[in-house]
Image (cartoon, coloured by chain):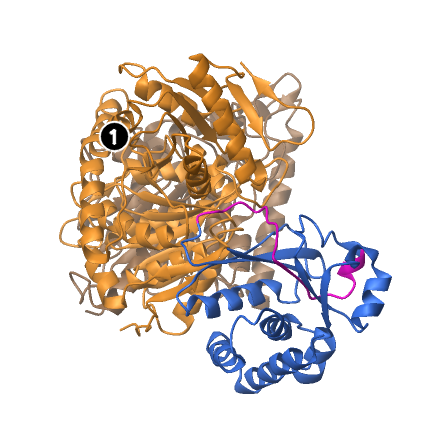
C-alpha cells in the first residue's frame, strides 16, 4: 500500500483525528511535548514504530502496567532512542527481504523522540551515526532547552542567560554562559535529506513539515520548540502563546534544510516581536531584567537579528 | 535466498571464524556491530558473507559498541534473530544496554572474545570482560576451543529464543588463545545447522502492526522488584533445564556432548582445579600426566557461567579434598569470583575441601603446564595438611617476587 | 606431538603460513593448532607463530613451546630475536637467508652444533610471487627437511588453501614452494 499524505482541513479535525497517543499520561499540565507528539502522529495514517529516549515523555507515557501508546513503542536508555528505532528499521528491511513480515503490504514509519538532553548532549553520537548510515527514520527533538525530567539542569541547548539548576543565576552569575548549540546546522551538515525546525503553535507549518518528512526516504531531523511550563516558568495555559512568542520573536525561526543545501524559511512573522517580550514572559530569564544584567537582553536581540539575517542570506544563496 | 556454502566435515577454523560460520548458518536477521580486537574478525567474516550473498539479513556497522547493542535491542524487539560480537572495552561500553536487553527479555546472541580491560590498555585475553557481564542477566556459555564456539552458538540461539526463556545469551571464548587459534572444527551442513535452531518465532514483536507493543517501560518501587524477580525466575528455573535439553538435542544430532559443568577425571579425584576458557583443556592434559604418576587429580570446567550451575557443581565437588579456584580476572580487593562461587556452592554441603584461589593469565599472560603442576602440588599439600598450606590467594605467572593475599 | 615455532615480521605471512600448514595437516586426519602471539604492533614488528600437530586431540593451550622445528622467515631475526628460546637438543632450524649454512652459523654462534638448514625464501618469493612473502616457500622447505608429506599431496592441498587468490598468484606460490623444496640445504 502506498502511503497517502493525510488531508487535514482545520484544527478541530486535526485535534480529533486518529489518536495513537492517549491523553492519559503523566506529563505536566500545559506540557508542549504531548501537543508535539500528537501533531506528529496525527500527520499520518500509516503504521508507526516509535522510540523514545529517557526523559519526560518516556517516564510519563509508559509507566507499567499502563501505556499511552497505541503504536509499537520502545525505550532503552537516555542516549539511544535513535538507534533503537534504527535497529527496528533494519529488522523491517531484513524481514521484508526474507518475506517474513506479518503485514507485508504495510510500510510503517519509524520515529524516535528525544528531549534536547538526549539529542544535543548524551545521544548526539547515536543520532549522528543513524544519520550517517541513512536509516529511513524520523528523529524528533522535543527541545525544551533543559533537562526537565530531572528538575532543570542545563543542556547544550540551554540558551545564554537562562537560569538552570546547574547554571543558576545569582549575585555573581547571570545563569547559563554558553550559547545554544546549532543542532539544525549540524544535522543538515550530515547531508540529511530533510531537516526542519517546527513549533506546535504553528500547526499547519508543522504538519506540512512532518508530512514532508514522512514522504522523504532516509533520515529526517525535526527540531520542535517545546515550551516547558515548569522549567521556563510560565502558566500552564500559556504554552501555545509562549511558543508563538518564540517563533514571532525569531528566537525559534521556522525553516527547513533540504539535502543539506537548500534552506527555506517557512514562516515570516508579520509583526516581529522584540526578544525582550519573549524573555520577559518566562521566569527563567527574570534576573535579566535587572540593571546588572539588562545588557544581555540587547545582546540577545543582536544575536537573534544576526541569525535571522544569516538564514535569509542562506535561503537566497541556496547553499 | 542466501547461497549455501559447502563445508568440509572438518574445517580448520579459529574461534572467530567458527562464530562467524555459525551466525551465517542460523541466518541471523540483523547484525549490528562495531569492531574491536580480538572479536573483529567475527564481524569482518560476516561482512564478507554478506558481500558475497551468503547471508541476506541486514548488516549494520554502527559507530560504537553501545550503539551496536542498542541497534540489536531495537531489532530484536522488532521481531527477528539478532546477534553481534565484541570484546573488552567495547563490552564495557555495552554494559548499560546489556542490562536493558535482558530486562526487556530479548533473545540476542553476543559473541565475546574475552580480553583484558585497561588501563593499561591490552589487547590480549583474560576474563575481565566476561566477569563484568556476570550480573547483567544474560545466559553466559563458555567455549574452550573453536569447536565449542561453533557448537555453543547454535545452542545459545536455541535456548535464548525459546519462548519460555526469552533471555539474551553470550558465547565466550578466550581472546587470541581461542579466537585466533586455528583448530579442526567438525561442521554441520548449512541445512542441519539451521535446522537445529529452526525458524525464528517472534513474540511481542513491534513489527506485528496489528498488535502494537510497548517495550522498555518505567517501573518504580511498585513493580521493578517483581520484574527483576521474574527475570531471575526464568534464568534460574527455566534456562538451566532448557540448556540441558539443548545439550541433549545437540548430542543426538552431532555426537558432541556438552554439560553445565564439564569434568575430567573427577570420579575419584582428591584434588581438583576449577577454571574457565582454554585453560580447562590445558589443565586436563596436565591431569592426564599427573594421573600417570598416580596422583588423583581432576579438572572442573564451568561451561554455563550464568545461570550458575550450583547443584551440579556441588555434586561434582562433593568428594574432593582440595580445590584450586583459578580466576583469569583480577578481583581487585577480594578473592576471585570462582573462589567465592565455589565457596558459596559448597558452604551448606557436607563437603569441606580446602579451597584456595589463584589469579593467573591477566592480559594474556601464559598459563603453562608447569604452572598447573605447581598448583596441583599446592593442592596436594593442602589435602595432606587438611588446611591451606599457602596463602588463600596467589598470583601465578607473575614476574618478580611472589604475590599473595589473605 | 610435533611443535613448530615461526619467527617472522608482522606482514610476512607467518600466521597465514601456520594456518595453511594446519589446514593441510588436518586433511590427513591429524589434529592441529595454529596460533600466534599478537600485540598492537604493526607491520614489520618481530612476532612468533606456532603449530602443534598430534594424533590425539590437542588439549594443551599454553603458549609455551619447546619446538621441534624453528622456522625463521625473516633473515635479520636470527640476530635480533630470541629464536633459540626453549630449544631442545634436536630442534631443527630452517632459516631464511642469502648466506650459506656455514656462513650463517659463523655469523650467529648460537647455531653452532645445531641442526640448521638454510633457504632464501625472500629471494624465492620475490622472484616467483613478486613480493617478499616468504611463508609458502618456507612450507616447501619444511616438507623437504621434515619429510612430512609428498610434494604432490602438499601442493594439491595448498592450492585448495589458497583458492581465494587469483590463479596467477596460486601458480606462483606453487613454483615458490617447489623451489624452496629443491633449494633448501
Which image quarter holds the C terminus of chain C? bottom right
Location of residue A242 in the rendering, given as x and y in whole percent from the top left corner: 41, 36
> Can see residue A74?
yes
> Tag 1: Cα neighbours inside 10 Å, few (<14), some, or many (≥20)?
some
**Is A179 above or below relative to B340?**
below
Chain letter, colour blue in render? C
> Can see residue A199?
no
**Is B235 above or below relative to B349?**
below
Depth check: B50 or C33 in front? C33
Q: Which residue is labeled 1 in the image?
A: B312
Depth check: A319 or A13 in front? A319
Q: Chain A is drawn in which colour?
A: brown
Label 1 residue SS:
helix
Chain letter, colour orange in render? B
Location of residue B142 in the rendering, given as x and y in whole percent from the top left corner: 37, 42
Q: The magenta stretch spans which residues?
A: C59-79
Residue shown at 37%/60% (left/top)? B185
Amino acid at each position: 500500500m502506498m502511503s497517502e499524505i493525510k488531508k487535514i482541513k482545520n484544527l478541530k479535525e486535526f485535534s480529533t483525528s486518529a489518536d495513537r497517543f492517549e491523553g492519559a499520561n503523566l506529563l505536566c499540565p500545559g506540557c508542549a511535548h504531548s501537543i508535539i507528539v500528537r501533531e506528529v502522529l496525527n500527520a499520518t495514517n500509516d503504521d508507526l514504530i516509535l522510540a523514545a529516549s529517557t526523559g519526560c515523555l518516556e517516564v510519563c507515557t509508559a509507566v507499567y502496567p499502563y501505556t499511552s501508546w497505541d503504536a509499537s513503542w520502545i525505550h532503552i536508555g537516555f542516549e539511544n532512542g535513535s538507534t533503537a528505532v534504527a535497529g527496528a528499521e533494519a529488522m523491517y528491511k531484513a524481514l521484508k527481504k526474507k518475506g517474513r513480515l506479518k503485514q507485508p503490504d504495510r510500510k510503517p514509519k519509524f520515529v524516535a523522540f528525544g528531549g534536547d538532553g538526549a539529542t544535543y548532549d548524551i545521544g548526539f553520537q547515536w543520532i549522528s551515526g543513524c544519520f550517517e548510515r541513512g536509516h529511513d527514520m524520523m528523529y524528533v527533538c522535543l527541545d525544551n532547552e533543559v533537562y526537565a525530567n530531572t528538575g532543570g539542569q542545563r543542556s547544550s541547548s540551554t540558551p545564554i542567560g537562562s537560569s538552570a539548576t546547574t547554571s543558576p543565576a545569582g549575585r555573581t552569575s547571570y545563569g547559563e554562559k554558553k550559547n545554544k548549540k546549532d543542532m539544525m546546522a549540524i544535522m543538515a551538515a550530515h547531508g540529511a535529506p530533510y531537516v526542519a525546525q517546527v513549533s506546535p503553535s504553528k500547526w499547519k507549518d508543522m504538519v506540512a513539515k512532518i508530512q514532508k518528512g514522512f514522504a522523504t526516504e532516509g533520515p529526517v531531523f525535526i527540531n520542535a520548540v517545546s515550551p516547558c511550563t515548569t522549567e521556563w516558568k510560565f502558566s500552564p495555559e500559556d504554552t501555545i502563546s509562549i511558543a508563538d512568542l518564540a517563533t514571532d520573536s525569531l528566537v525559534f525561526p521556522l525553516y527547513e534544510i533540504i539535502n543539506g543545501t537548500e534552506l527555506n524559511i517557512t514562516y515570516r512573522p508579520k509583526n516581529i516581536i522584540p526578544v525582550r517580550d519573549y524573555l520577559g514572559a518566562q521566569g527563567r530569564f527574570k534576573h535579566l531584567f535587572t540593571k546588572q544584567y539588562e545588557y544581555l537582553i540587547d545582546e540577545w536581540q543582536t544575536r537573534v537579528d544576526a541569525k535571522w539575517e544569516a538564514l535569509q542570506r542562506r535561503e537566497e544563496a541556496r547553499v | 535466498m542466501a547461497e549455501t556454502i559447502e563445508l568440509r566435515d572438518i574445517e580448520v577454523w579459529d574461534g572467530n571464524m567458527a562464530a562467524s560460520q555459525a551466525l551465517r548458518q542460523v541466518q541471523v536477521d540483523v547484525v549490528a556491530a562495531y569492531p574491536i580486537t580480538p572479536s573483529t574478525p567475527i564481524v569482518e567474516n560476516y561482512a564478507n558473507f554478506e558481500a558475497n550473498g551468503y547471508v541476506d539479513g541486514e548488516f549494520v556497522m554502527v559507530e560504537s559498541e553501545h550503539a551496536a547493542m542498542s541497534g540489536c535491542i531495537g531489532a530484536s524487539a522488532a521481531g527477528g534473530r539478532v546477534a553481534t560480537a565484541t570484546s573488552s572495552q567495547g563490552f564495557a561500553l555495552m554494559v548499560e544496554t546489556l542490562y536493558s536487553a535482558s530486562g526487556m527479555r530479548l533473545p540476542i546472541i553476543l559473541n565475546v572474545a574475552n580480553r583484558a580491560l585497561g588501563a593499561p590498555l591490552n589487547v590480549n585475553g583474560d576474563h575481565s570482560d566476561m566477569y563484568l557481564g556476570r550480573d547483567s542477566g544474560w545466559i553466559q556459555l563458555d567455549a574452550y576451543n573453536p569447536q565449542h564456539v561453533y557448537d555453543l552458538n547454535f545452542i545459545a540461539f536455541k535456548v535464548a529464543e525459546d519462548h519460555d526463556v526469552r533471555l539474551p545469551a553470550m558465547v565466550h571464548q578466550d581472546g587470541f588463545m581461542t579466537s585466533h587459534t586455528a583448530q579442526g572444527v567438525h561442521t554441520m551442513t548449512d541445512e542441519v545447522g539451521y535446522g537445529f535452531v529452526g525458524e525464528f518465532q517472534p513474540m511481542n514483536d513491534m513489527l506485528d502492526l496489528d498488535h502494537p507493543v510497548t517495550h522498555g517501560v518505567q517501573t518504580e518501587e511498585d513493580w521493578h522488584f517483581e520484574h527483576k524477580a521474574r527475570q531471575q525466575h526464568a534464568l534460574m528455573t527455566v534456562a538451566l533445564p532448557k540448556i540441558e535439553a539443548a545439550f541433549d538435542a545437540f548430542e543426538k544430532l552431532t555426537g558432541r556432548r556438552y554439560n553445565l559443568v564439564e569434568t575430567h577425571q573427577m570420579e575419584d579425584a582428591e584434588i581438583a582445579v576449577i577454571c574457565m576458557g582454554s585453560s580447562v583443556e590445558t589443565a586436563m592434559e596436565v591431569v592426564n600426566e599427573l594421573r600417570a604418576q598416580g596422583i588423583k587429580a581432576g579438572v572442573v570446567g564451568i561451561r554455563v557461567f550464568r545461570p550458575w550451575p550450583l547443584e551440579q557443581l556441588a555434586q561434582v565437588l562433593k568428594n574432593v579434598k582440595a580445590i584450586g579456584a583459578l580466576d583469569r580476572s583480577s578481583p581487585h580487593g577480594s578473592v576471585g569470583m570462582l573462589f567465592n562461587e565455589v565457596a558459596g556452592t559448597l558452604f551448606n554441603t557436607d563437603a569441606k575441601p580446602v579451597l584456595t584461589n589463584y589469579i593467573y593469565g591477566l592480559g594474556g599472560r601464559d598459563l603453562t603446564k608447569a604452572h598447573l603442576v605447581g598448583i596441583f602440588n599446592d593442592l596436594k599439600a593442602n589435602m595432606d595438611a587438611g588446611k591451606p598450606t599457602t596463602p588463600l590467594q596467589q598470583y601465578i605467572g607473575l614476574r618478580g617476587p611472589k604475590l599473595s593475599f589473605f | 606431538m610435533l611443535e613448530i615455532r615461526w619467527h617472522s615480521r608482522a606482514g610476512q605471512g607467518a600466521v597465514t603460513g601456520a594456518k595453511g600448514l594446519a589446514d593441510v595437516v588436518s586433511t590427513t586426519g591429524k589434529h592441529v593448532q595454529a596460533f600466534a602471539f599478537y600485540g598492537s604492533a604493526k607491520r614489520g614488528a618481530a612476532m612468533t607463530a606456532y603449530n602443534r600437530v598430534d594424533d590425539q586431540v590437542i588439549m594443551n593451550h599454553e603458549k609455551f613451546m619447546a619446538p621441534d622445528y624453528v622456522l625463521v622467515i625473516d633473515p635479520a631475526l636470527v640476530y635480533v630475536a630470541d629464536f633459540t628460546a626453549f630449544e631442545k637438543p634436536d630442534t631443527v632450524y630452517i632459516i631464511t637467508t642469502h648466506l650459506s649454512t656455514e656462513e650463517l652459523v659463523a655469523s650467529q654462534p648460537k647455531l653452532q652444533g645445531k641442526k640448521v638448514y638454510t633457504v632464501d625464501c625472500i629471494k624465492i618469493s620475490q622472484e616467483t610471487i613478486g613480493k617478499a612473502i616468504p611463508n609458502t616457500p618456507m612450507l616447501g622447505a619444511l616438507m623437504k627437511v621434515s619429510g612430512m608429506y609428498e610434494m604432490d599431496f602438499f601442493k594439491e592441498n595448498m592450492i585448495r588453501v589458497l583458492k581465494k587468490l587469483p590463479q596467477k598468484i596460486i601458480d606462483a606460490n606453487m613454483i615458490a614452494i617447489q623451489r624452496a623444496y629443491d633449494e633448501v640445504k
